[in-house]
Image (tube, grey):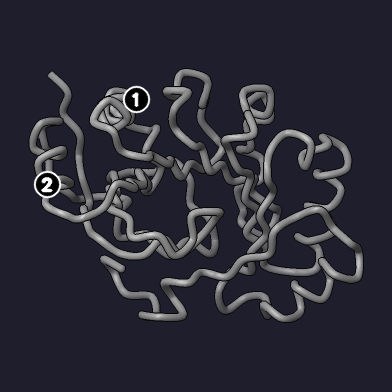
Amino acid sequence: MVNLRISEIFFSLQGEASRIGLPTVFVRLTGCPLRCAWCDTSYAFTGGKLMLLADILAEIGRYPAREVCVTGGEPLAQKDCLALLSALCDAGYAVSLETSGALDIADVDPRVARIMDIKAPDSGESGRNRWENLACLTRNDEIKFVLASRADYVWACAAIREHRLDTLCPVLMSPAQGRLDARELAEWILADGLPVRFQVQLHKLLWGNMQGR
């Protein structure tokens, strides 16, 4: 029996990555083994409610969208997340997974677009990066850096060069809200001609840091 602890299921616009702006159903799983300094979803660390897979699919089906994003917390911290992802793909949804990059992504259904963080030092969790995950990535996936300082940016640039990340899949950079000025990061990227996509969180521009948006 597939049973998952769900923090929330809601309908909004995708605020990040290549699917930005698309109407999307978000399934936020409870729990995360990381404690990033700039985390904006700490409410999902605990609580939530247990739901059967069929009930999750029924709730998603209430909304007029074919895009589904499974997020957290860290969704892969729940073993039944893999079954949820496959069931969503089987149901015909375009599925993305937002993951911290600290857990193994090898067994994620290949139909799923994996949006994988690489944690920079100011997150406090850079030691948790699972670099072996890079070998699993395809052009369907994306790497995301959330940066809080110039030092984070320099570190990320070195990681891109060392691992040739831009040859694996699209690479995203975004400023940690309230910690790094978005314009400043944009100017650094332009000055260095970096092969990345700059992004800000669209949902926060529209609604602020509102839960369920």
Say which element carries label 2.
helix
Q: Which mark identifies residue 82?
A: 1
Depicted 64 relative to depicted 199: above or below: above
Depicted 150 relative to depicted 113: above or below: below
- Residue type at tag 2: Glu
Q: Nearer the viewer, mark 2 or mark 1?
A: 2
**Mark 1 or mark 2, which is nearer the start of the sequence?**
2
The image shows residue 153 at horizontal and vertical percentages of 78, 61
Query: What residue is shown with label 2?
Result: 59
Marks 2 and 1, how far apart at CA: 18 Å
Name which quarter of the figure residue 111 lies in.
top left
The image shows residue 211 at horizontal and vertical percentages of 28, 69
The image shows residue 30 at horizontal and vertical percentages of 28, 45
Q: Quadrant of the C terminus?
A: bottom left
- Residue type at tag 1: Leu
Q: Which mark identifies residue 194?
A: none
